[in-house]
Image (cartoon, coloured by chain):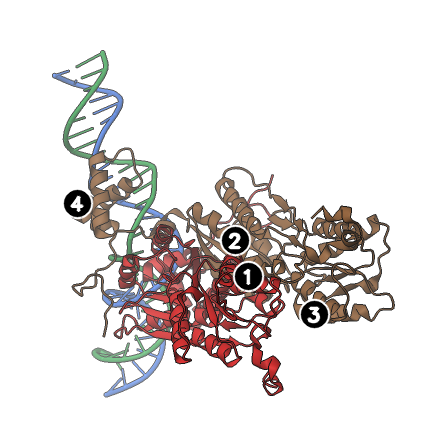
Chain colours: A brown, B red, C green, D blue
Amino acid sequence: MFKRLNNSKGKVKKKATIVDIALKLGITPSAVSKAFSNHPRISEQTKEAVLKAAQQLDYRPNAMATGLRKGKSGLIGVIVPAIHYSFFATAIKGAEETLSREGYSVIIAQSKDDYNFEKKQLEGMMRAQVEGVIASLAMGTQNFDFYKILSSKIPVVLFDRTFEDEKISTVTVDDFSGAVKAIDHLVQRGYSRIAHLAGYSHVLPFRKRIDGYKRALIDHGIIFDPDYLIECAPNTNEGINATESLFKLSQPPDAIFAASDYLAFGAISVVQEKGIKIPEEFGIVGFSNEQFSSQVTPAISTVDQFSETLGSTAAQLLIDQLRDGKVKNFIPQRKVISPQLIHRQSSAGKIYYSTPAAATIL
Amino acid sequence: MFKRLNNSKGKVKKKATIVDIALKLGITPSAVSKAFSNHPRISEQTKEAVLKAAQQLDYRPNAMATGLRKGKSGLIGVIVPAIHYSFFATAIKGAEETLSREGYSVIIAQSKDDYNFEKKQLEGMMRAQVEGVIASLAMGTQNFDFYKILSSKIPVVLFDRTFEDEKISTVTVDDFSGAVKAIDHLVQRGYSRIAHLAGYSHVLPFRKRIDGYKRALIDHGIIFDPDYLIECAPNTNEGINATESLFKLSQPPDAIFAASDYLAFGAISVVQEKGIKIPEEFGIVGFSNEQFSSQVTPAISTVDQFSETLGSTAAQLLIDQLRDGKVKNFIPQRKVISPQLIHRQSSAGKIYYSTPAAATIL
DNA sequence: CTAATTTGTTCAAACGTTTGAACAATTCAA
DNA sequence: TTGAATTGTTCAAACGTTTGAACAAATTAG
């Protein structure tokens, strides 16, 4: 019953173009175009008239035409494994804010952690003529050729889930040092038999956390026990299973460093169920500072990755590259964001409860 | 030190166009174009040759050129108050999946709950020539003119935070019935003095929850006490404050229906601190089914809004409108998604703990 | 064997904008 | 007063693609 209207009279007006303005003012389209771009040779009078006419006609430049002519789309592609993970959602937020401030529009896509799908999505972005791409790799992506080719055509910045390439800028969290901080903290708080619920080691950030874990143990003179390292998918359920298997060991751990807050939470529920007190008898540190981790009981100590900063930094790197790219020679950047350990109750420590002095720390 | 390369030889090849293919094959661009679109008058031989050449040249159609010529950008704009809220992130996920399946690219933007910013972002989308817009309104948006004008030019679908307009399709959660379900449940579980930690009533979904709350009380013969209704920002802190003020009443409630899980969580912490047992003495139901709500102790009963479905439904509605729009007359749709109450421990009920019969319900 | 039809392609214009060159009119310098 | 410089505009081509019309060649019909 309804027709797409453009005014209350029921007539469908086409979108106004530069030509309509020109016609209305009795000048040529090129004069109008130059007026908009504030060309010095166009009279103030004309400029004003053009602006006014544009207003009246509700004119909006057609980015496709402009883009085609100028060879610039004003579009940036952002691709992540899944939009709804808070880590990625927050990173996207950071990237979007930075990019839109610079006048870019952001096209998003999800890889669903599937390499072929990722490729397909990137193809789409290329067709859309994105000027640059910000990406976090799908778990399944082991073949980086596509990204290598892509990065030879347009600027690419990888974040978090990256791969090493001498021509691509990356922004990563220093997962290694995050892990080290977590272990240092646990040791400091009096725990000594520290297990690690790890993510899959073929995913770079998870591998780095494993490396950091091992390294920190060595630095503290603790011998690494392979039984204390369990790789699993980063969710609560796997955290439960892994923790249960840890308690079947002849010598169970007295602390867990988990590669995600979900794993940590799973661990907590198992430990509590066994009647073991957290943090008095058992310490837990998670990773990622998920929203819920501050709200559960006990609140989970965790490593914050500054995901919003991650996104905005990646965006800034891309913008820089876009600006300089054609002129100067391009030197890929490698930004590393230092994560921060957030001390909460789950690892307050044996020390905390045994020595009043330490209590004042919190 | 690095130059943007296109091959290992160090020469910068321009992107291949239809003209390059034509030149290579000694035919005209139009023949190439027709070959791609599988035009019946182009010989199979030519089609094959074109496809092969395209492959070799790594040709990719320029969506800006195609779009300009065809008057279609293949772009859909999605604008939400904030990307990183899990509700919106999940809705975006749903929309993105549906839209990309249909070959559309998704441009996202955030309004930051600011009307002027929202307008600015939409302007940008219009310039980018989006073919349609999916939006959830900024809290501050009270003036809907912009959306009315917009919807007269391109299809618009509003979701969750909508306004009533006879020309715009909407997808909403039935917040009213969600609230009713929550109250019914609380009453059934033996609670009778039920307070409501509400969101701001000028935001439609929150208002509907308030209405549902009031309605359900009436239906259960419970008199509405204005002291039991507190409007606040939907976060943990405000939940704490509001709950504390409830306990200062001469007759405090024995249950709270909160308009968000964050509010509910704040309430829980206050109630527990007072030594009041949940759910034996006090029942709590939240809203939105945030990830953490299943993981805290006690797990929070909550109203799930199926936000992913919300997003995909909005996308589907938009696609339908895009497809039919020009041909048939457009009849705006009004989809309402029925939320689901998820029973968890926080409202297991006085009944549950007093009568063994009811225990089997869980 | 001629005319009509089919087949495969080219031609040319169009989408909306930008931009260097060209041009006419005005102003300035000498 | 003539030439040069400046000012304000128009011209025309270009960006990469699509598409109806036109056209030549090959095939079919009668």
Estimate the spatial distance between the alpha carbons at disc 1 and disc 3, rounded to whole Å. 28 Å
Q: Are marks 1 and 3 in contact (CB under 8 Å)?
A: no
Q: Nearer the viewer, mark 1 or mark 2?
A: 1
Residue B3: x %, y % from top left = 56, 42
Report the residue marked by disc 3. A238
Q: Amino acid at mark 1?
A: Gly
Q: Secondary structure at mark 3?
A: helix
User: Is the residue at mark 1 from the same chain as the one at mark 3?
Assistant: no
User: Percent position (x, y) of residue A126?
Assistant: 48, 57
Query: Of the residues shown, which amino acid type is indicated by label 3?
Result: Glu
Residue mark closest to the camera, 3 vs 2: 3
For disc 1, the chain is B
Q: Classify the position of the C terminus of chain B by image quarter.
A: bottom right
Mark 2 is on which residue type?
Val
Query: Is A301 left, or right, of B25 in this rendering?
Result: right
Tag 2 secondary structure: strand
CB contact under 8 Å: marks 4 and 2: no
Q: Which mark is residue A25?
A: 4
Question: Who comes first in sequence, dot 3 or dot 2?
Answer: 2
Q: Earlier in the sequence, mark 4 or mark 2?
A: 4
**Mark 1 or mark 4, whichever is nearer to me:** 1
Q: CA distance from mark 4 to mark 2?
A: 41 Å
Q: Position of residue B227 (x, y in %)?
A: 42, 64
Do tags 1 and 2 sit on the same chain?
no
Q: Which residue is mark 1?
A: B266
Q: Secondary structure at mark 1?
A: helix
Residue in the image at 22% along x and 61% along y:
A6
The alpha-carbon separation of the residues under discs 3 and 2 comes to 33 Å
Q: Which residue is mark 2?
A: A133
The reply to whether callout 3 and callout 4 are in contact (CB within 8 Å) is: no
